Image (spheres, rainbow, N blue to C red):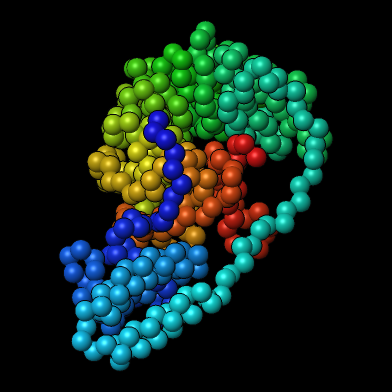
Amino acid sequence: MNSIDDIISINDPDSVENLEYIDDLGSGEFFDFNNVDSNGESISNKDIQMKVRKNWPDDEILYAANREIEKTCSSIIKSILFSRECLACTISTVSMLVGILIVVYTMPKKPVVICDMNFALVNPIQVEYNYRPQSVAVGDFNNDTWMDIVVANRATNNIAVFFGYGNAGLSSTSMTYSTGTNSTPCMVTVGDFNNDGRLDIVVANYGVNNVGIFLGIGKGAFESQSTIPTGSSRPLLIYVADLNNDKAQDMIIANYGTQSISIFHGYGYGKFSNAITFFTGYDSIPMSITVGDFNNDKHMDIAIANSGTNNVGILLGNENGTFTTQNIFPTGYGSHPYSIATHDFNGDNFLDIVVANHGSHSVGVLLGHGNGSFSHSTIYSIGNSIPIAVAIGDMNNDNYTDLVVTNNGT
């Protein structure tokens, strides 16, 4: 993995074409006040090239403005040194520069709103640290209306099911199921793969290159594991969804070893098709997956957090259940996105994407355009924390969507 650098800007900081300012001048409209040459320098010494766009955070406005002022200052100095209109030119340019600086450095700053949440503590369950619990999933496995959890234990090559008892928390003991010798389970999730109304469990067995399925048989019990081979893929993550609208749940696997994702279509009775694999790019390291209809064609699309290549990959779904080749949208140099989720954050009826940027200590939001494309990532710093995962929900019941980020190191 390359060294990690901080993100400087949501766009290339050396490209004037990407520097965009904000004022409340209309929804998404752009205003270009003068032209620039091929090198990005201002053609006119008297005007400053500005692009105005609505709804950018103030700190990004300030940074973009500072970058443009640097280029403008260079142009102004040249004007003073080489223009024949000495005194008048000097007075005019200095006045203009002072006015710009006053506007930029007196812009009002919006305070960052931090959620004030209260949670009730319960007695922790006894998941041994030496078991190296790697992943957890939630579901009502015994149909008693209380949420249960299943944990993938990497060191002991098994999964452990803990039953919920309402306000009393979770059971102190667990039911364990082997995932196989040297299986090294990395990810666990749930779904109903045989449409019997009981939750089943699926595990990504990184160490032995297969996917393990535990079918639920009622009262919280599960059959022994059946496996689906994944080649030499080193499966890292599993996402469950009905991709082809056949009312049978499918699986998408993120493959660390082959830099790809694999789709297994479910038949609705606990069996799956052979893998359909899509390459995500050399050294892409796909770490997380989500799905949604990103181009509003009523077909499910796939979004991938490619940690190694610092981007989000989009595979658009077709009517026949196939997918297009990957389109990529950058998340910022050195961002290394580890987790991805989707929601309509700005209420325009287009799905947006949020990523947890492990490398740049930030969360990035890419607003969707409704046609399968996305805006440049808007970055929200979370200080010195190292984000591992991001989730979405209305945590304080105010009818606005909140983000929950799991951080390492803080």
Q: Is residue 292 above or below residue 18?
A: above
Which quadrant, please, contains the C terminus? Answer: top right
* The one of 270 and 196 positioned closer to us in this rendering: 270
Q: Residue at x 60, y 40 (%)?
A: 407
Q: Residue furthest left?
A: 38
Residue 275 is situated, as x and y percent measured from the top left of the image, at 32, 26
Residue 42 is situated, as x and y percent measured from the top left of the image, at 24, 73
Residue 339 is situated, as x and y percent measured from the top left of the image, at 48, 40
In terms of image quadrants, where is residue 389?
A: top right
Residue 75 is situated, as x and y percent measured from the top left of the image, at 28, 73
Q: Residue at x 35, y 57 (%)?
A: 13
Which quadrant, please, contains the N terminus? Answer: top left
In terms of image quadrants, where is residue 90?
A: bottom left
In terms of image quadrants, where is residue 36?
A: bottom left
Q: Is residue 281 visible?
A: yes
Q: Is residue 245 visible?
A: no
Q: Residue furthest top?
A: 181
Q: Is residue 388 above or below residue 152?
A: below
